[in-house]
Image: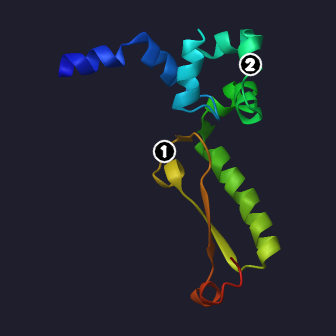
């Protein structure tokens, strides 16, 4: 069974599908279809105008912003983003909503793939009355 698992993980088509799934908006089904069309990575996809024309608008954005989206965000930049979001939320919600940075930041990672921010009522009274949410 271990040999079969190893062979599966080294299968060129499965490796290609895994690479293509890193494109925002491309799931397993689309990635597998791209592989069937002969596309094995982002560079080949960008060069194949015929296949690019078959992508939906979300997937085209994912291709256009691929290198931006795979770049990790340093922890200090996550803190800067959280500060800006907190300022906007405070201004719009008059202190009735607090923000909590979650995900990889909360787990203490030095870099994040995205910034997860949870908006919560700042008090139990607000939550009960649904004033701020």
Q: Position of residue 51 (x, y in %)?
A: 71, 16
Residue 44 drawn above or below residue 82: above
Quadrant into which the C terminus falls: bottom right
Badge 1: residue crowd in 10 Å (few <14, some 14–19, many ≥20): few
Q: Position of residue 20 (x, y in %)?
A: 57, 23
Q: Residue furthest left?
A: 1
Q: The N terminus is located in which quarter?
A: top left
The part of the image, by quadrant, that contains residue 118 is bottom right
The Cα atoms of the two marked residues, 2 and 1, are separated by 35 Å
Circle nearer the viewer, 2 or 1: 2
Q: Secondary structure at mark 1?
A: loop
Q: Which residue is mark 2?
A: 52
Tell me which corner region of the image, top left, top right, bottom left or bottom right, holds residue 72. Answer: top right
Q: Is residue 132 above or below residue 1?
A: below
64 vs 106, nearest the viewer: 64
Question: What is the quadrant of residue 113 in the picture?
Answer: top right
Q: Earlier in the sequence, mark 2 or mark 1?
A: 2
Q: Residue at x 65, y 86 (%)?
A: 126
Kindly state the secondary structure of the residue where label 2 is placed: helix
Mark 2 surroundings: few (<14), some (14-19) or many (≥20) residues within 10 A: some
In percent of the image, x 51 and y 52: which residue is there? 103
Instruction: Judge by depth and name the residue closer to the eye, 29 or 108.
Output: 29
The residue labelled by disc 1 is 109
Res. 75 mark? none
**Which residue occupies the foreground of this view, 42 or 113?**
42
């Amino acid at each position: 069974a271990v040999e079969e698992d190893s062979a599966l993980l080294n299968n060129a088509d499965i490796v290609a599908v895994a690479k293509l799934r890193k494109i925002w908006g491309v799931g397993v089904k689309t990635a597998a279809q791209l592989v069937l069309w002969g596309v094995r990575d982002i560079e080949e996809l960008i060069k194949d105008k015929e296949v690019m024309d078959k992508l939906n608008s979300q997937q085209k954005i994912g291709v256009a912003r691929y290198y931006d989206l795979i770049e990790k965000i340093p922890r200090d930049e996550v803190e800067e983003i959280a500060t800006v979001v907190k300022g906007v939320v405070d201004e719009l919600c008059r202190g009735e909503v607090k923000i909590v940075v979650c995900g990889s930041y909360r787990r203490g990672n030095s870099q994040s793939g995205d910034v997860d921010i949870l908006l919560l009522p700042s008090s139990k009274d607000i939550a009960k009355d649904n004033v701020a949410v």
